[in-house]
Amino acid sequence: MTGADTIAHVKHEPDLSRYTLWQDGEPVGLADYRLVGQELKFTHTEIDPAKRAHGLASILIEQALDDVRTRTDLTVVAACPFVADWIDQHAEYQDLLIRGT
């Protein structure tokens, strides 16, 4: 566990079709998505350049995927290369790619 784990949290903003990562009361990252039928397609992930290399993008994606898993039965489409790589490295999330198919 890094120090970022204890001070960073993810907020779902459905009106903006994104998950945002907050640290010390400031937004430091986002993961945009599009809903297409029964698919939630992650299209873009971004972390503030000054905050990179601290594992924040991983925290953002893990918490976003956990929210999708518990709140919906949607199939995840990893159109964003970072999300695709992250899921490839975390086998326990690969079932999200085939749900509902």
Image: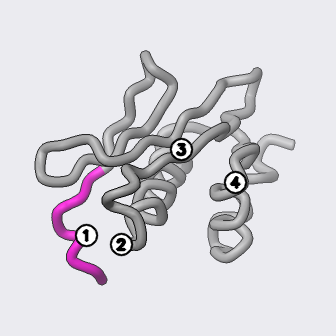
As measured in the structure, the alpha-carbon distance from the residue carrying label 4 to the one carrying label 2 is 25 Å
Image disc number at residue 26: none
| Residue for badge 4 | 96
Residue range in magenta is 1-9
Q: Earlier in the sequence, mark 2 or mark 3?
A: 2
As measured in the structure, the alpha-carbon distance from the residue carrying label 4 to the one carrying label 1 is 25 Å
Please, what is the three-letter code of the amino acid marked with disc 3?
Val
Element type where label 4 sits in the image: helix
As measured in the structure, the alpha-carbon distance from the residue carrying label 2 to the one carrying label 3 is 24 Å
Element type where label 1 sits in the image: helix
| Residue for badge 1 | 4
Judge by depth and name the residue closer to the eye, 55 or 34: 55
| Residue for badge 3 | 68
Q: Residue at x 73, y 33 (%)?
A: 39
- Asked whether the residues under the numbered discs 2 and 1 touch, taking CB atoms below 8 Å apart as contact, a structural biologist would say yes
> Where the C terminus falls, by quadrant?
top right
Mark 1: give few (<14), some (14-19) or many (20+) Cα within 10 Å: some
Q: Residue at x 43, y 55 (%)?
A: 60
Q: Earlier in the sequence, mark 4 or mark 1?
A: 1
Image disc number at residue 54: 2
Q: Earlier in the sequence, mark 4 or mark 2?
A: 2
Check residue 53 for magenta coloring: no
Which of labels 4 and 2 is toward the front? 2
